[in-house]
Image: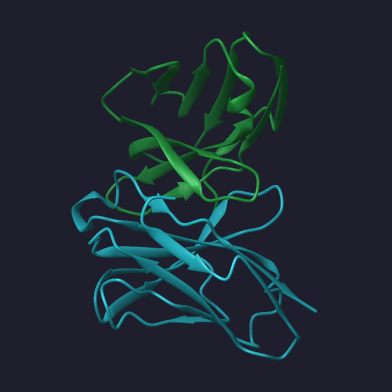
Chain colours: A green, B cyan
């Protein structure tokens, strides 16, 4: 079962612009994570936000979480061509230790 | 891809044949996971194991089997009973008490069955 739905499905921007991706989910969660996947490769963990947190930063990444709306957003500031990848949100439903992945946003950053 | 190896990178099989995908980790992680990814989709959990000699079905276990005889290894067999086996298969691991916090992924095996 895929709990997360991501929006947009695809995003194209120029280098230097900001990229925002959104994730919605269905059930109560322990935490929400964002992962990056370069084409044809494995996933890399980017950032985790717990259910009692509202915002978290890591370098050029900013994640927000609104548990009342069951949604999260990932902002990548000052994007670079190397940020081109697919980005997935993954939730850990309450009282479980399994990750449930969303459908992903494909980001293309043009130099 | 941090200490998790999957082999081979590409695998081709004829319909009706079983095939085993390898996953090895040297991170000393207790928990290991197998996911399937179809084009344009997220990952779906096939099987997971939190400790040697124990494993649990995920959301789409039908047509697959696993074993966990060693901490470092978690091979996945795609059997002929799996109706649509062509996909990208990803293995992951995590420390046992951090399975809900972050997982480390291998580079994946792309299986094509014709």
Q: Residue furthest right?
A: B114
Q: At which x and y percent is residue B46?
A: 49, 68
Residue B51 in view in this figure: yes
Location of residue A34 by image quarter: top left
Q: At which x and y percent is residue B74?
A: 38, 74
Q: Residue at x 67, y 90 (%)?
A: B17
In this rendering, the count of numbered labels is: 0
Image quarter in which the C terminus of chain B is found: bottom right
Location of residue B86 by image quarter: bottom right
Residue B58 lies, with reference to residue A33, above or below; the image says: below
Residue A26 in view in this figure: no
Residue A111 lies, with reference to residue B80, above or below; the image says: above
* Horizontal side of residue A104 vs A92, given as left or right: right
Q: At which x and y percent is residue A83?
A: 58, 26
* Horizontal side of residue A41 vs A108, given as left or right: left
Q: Residue at x 62, y 8 (%)?
A: A16
Residue A98 lies, with reference to residue B58, above or below; the image says: above
Q: Residue furthest left?
A: B97
Q: At which x and y percent is residue B23?
A: 43, 70
Location of residue B15 by image quarter: bottom right
Q: Residue at x 48, y 27 (%)?
A: A71
């Amino acid at each position: 079962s895929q709990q997360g739905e991501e929006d947009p499905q695809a995003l194209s921007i120029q280098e230097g612009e900001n990229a925002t991706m959104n994730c919605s989910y269905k059930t109560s969660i322990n935490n929400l994570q964002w992962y990056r996947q370069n084409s044809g490769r494995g996933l890399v963990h980017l950032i985790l936000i717990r259910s009692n947190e509202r915002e978290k930063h890591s370098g050029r990444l900013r994640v927000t979480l609104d548990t009342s709306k069951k949604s999260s957003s990932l902002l990548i500031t000052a994007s670079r061509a190397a940020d081109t990848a697919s980005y997935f949100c993954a939730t850990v439903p309450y009282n479980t230790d399994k990750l449930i992945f969303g459908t992903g946003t494909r980001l293309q950053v043009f130099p | 891809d941090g200490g998790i190896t999957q082999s081979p990178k590409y695998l081709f099989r004829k319909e009706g044949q079983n095939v085993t995908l390898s996953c090895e980790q040297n991170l000393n992680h207790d928990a290991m996971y197998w996911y399937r990814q179809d084009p344009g989709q997220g990952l779906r959990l096939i099987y997971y194991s939190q400790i040697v000699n124990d494993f649990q079905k995920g959301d789409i276990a039908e047509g697959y089997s696993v074993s966990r005889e060693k901490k470092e290894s978690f091979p996945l067999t795609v059997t002929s009973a799996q109706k649509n086996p062509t996909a990208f298969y990803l293995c992951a691991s995590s420390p046992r008490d951090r399975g809900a916090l972050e997982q480390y992924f291998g580079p994946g095996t792309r299986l094509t069955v014709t």
